Image (cartoon, grey):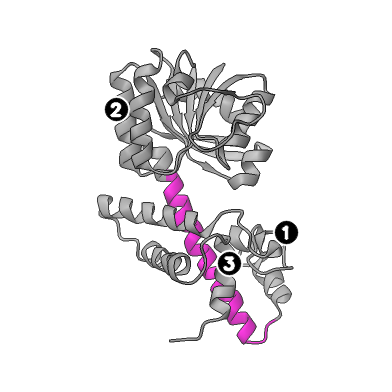
Amino acid sequence: MKIGFIGLGNMGAPMAANLVEADHDVIGHDIHAAMPDGVVAAISAAGAAKDADVVITMLPNGAILRVVADELIPAMKQGAVLCDCSTVDVESARTVADHAAKAGVLAIDAPVSGGIGGAAAGTLTFMAGGSDAAFAIVKPLFDIMGQKAVHCGPSGNGQAAKICNNMILGVTMIATCEAFALADKLGLDRQKMFDVVSTSSGYSWTMNAYCPAPGVGPQSPADNAYKPGFAAELMLKDLRLSQQAAVAADADTPMGHLAALLYESFVESEGGKGMDFSAMLPRFEKRHRG
C-alpha cells in the first residue's frame, strides 16, 4: 500500500519503520522529528496524504487531531482510510470520523497498547473503532505493526476501549505499589510478597508482568531506575480522558477519579514527570499515613 504517516515521534517512528520493512511505501510528515530510514519526507501533512491508500496519524491530543484532520481529509482520495492511532477523547474521534464520512473517506480510531518497546518490536495491540470496511483495509497493517487488533465497534469505540483499559491499569498499579510499600513496613520480604501474590488472588498484570519493585519478577522499568516504558504523565493523560468520558456518560468511577488525582499530584508536584508510571512505589515508600 501507499501509506501516509503523520507524527513520527517515539511511537510513530518505529511503527512506520516496520511498515517500510514490510515493503510498503511510506510518506511521512512531522514538524519536529526526523524521518526514519526508508520513509520519504513530505513538506506537509496534506502532501503525505495525497494518493495514499491509508493515512496513519499518531498525535498528542484530540485538539491537534482535529486540526490535522481538517488538513488531511480534503487531500485524501475517495475510499482511502484515515487511521488515527493517537489516544484522544472519544468525542474528537467521532467528530473526525463524521468529517471523513462527509468527504467520502473511511475513518478508524485505533489507539495502541504496548508502549515504545511494542512499537519497535511490532507487538502492539490495536483497539479499533470504525466500519467493517475500514477495519478490513487496515487490518494487514495492524498485523505488521502489532500482535493483535480488536475491532471494538463503531467510531469512538477504540478510544473507549483504550481509556477503560488504562483506567484499570492506573488503578491497579497504584494498588500494587501501595501493597509493596505496606509489605515493606510490615517486614515482609518483597520476593516473598511477589511469590505469594503472583500465584494467588492478587495476581495482576502490574504485579506479574510489570512489577514496580526492582529485582522482583520479570525485568521492568523498575530495574532501570524507573526510566519510562510508559511515562507517568501519559498515564495521567489517559486517566484524565477516562474521567472526561465518565462525566459525559454520567458514569460513577470513584477509583478512576482518585487514581487521576494521585497521578496528577505525582506528576505535577512530586517529581514524577519523566519517570515510569510504576515509580509510584518509591513515592509511597516515602509517605506516611495521614
Q: Secondary structure at mark 1?
A: loop
Quadrant housing the C terminus: bottom left
Magenta-tinted stretch:
161-188
Q: Name the dominant secondary structure of the magenta segment.
A: helix
Crowd tier of the residue under label 2, counting other residues whose Cα lies within 10 Å: few below 14, some 14–19, many 20 or above: some
Q: Residue at x 39, y 39 (%)?
A: 157
Residue indicated by mark 2: 98
Q: Is residue 250 left or right of residue 110?
A: left
Asked whether residue 112 is in view, the answer is yes
Residue 176 percent location from the top left of the image: 57, 69
Q: Is residue 130 above or below residue 232?
A: above
**Label drawn at residue 279:** 3
Q: Residue at x 25, y 54 (%)?
A: 250
Residue 171 falls inside the magenta stretch: yes
**Quadrant of the rendered structure where residue 256 is?**
bottom left
Q: Nearer the viewer, mark 3 or mark 2?
A: 3
Residue type, mark 2 in image:
Asp
Residue indicated by mark 1: 219
Q: Earlier in the sequence, mark 1 or mark 3?
A: 1
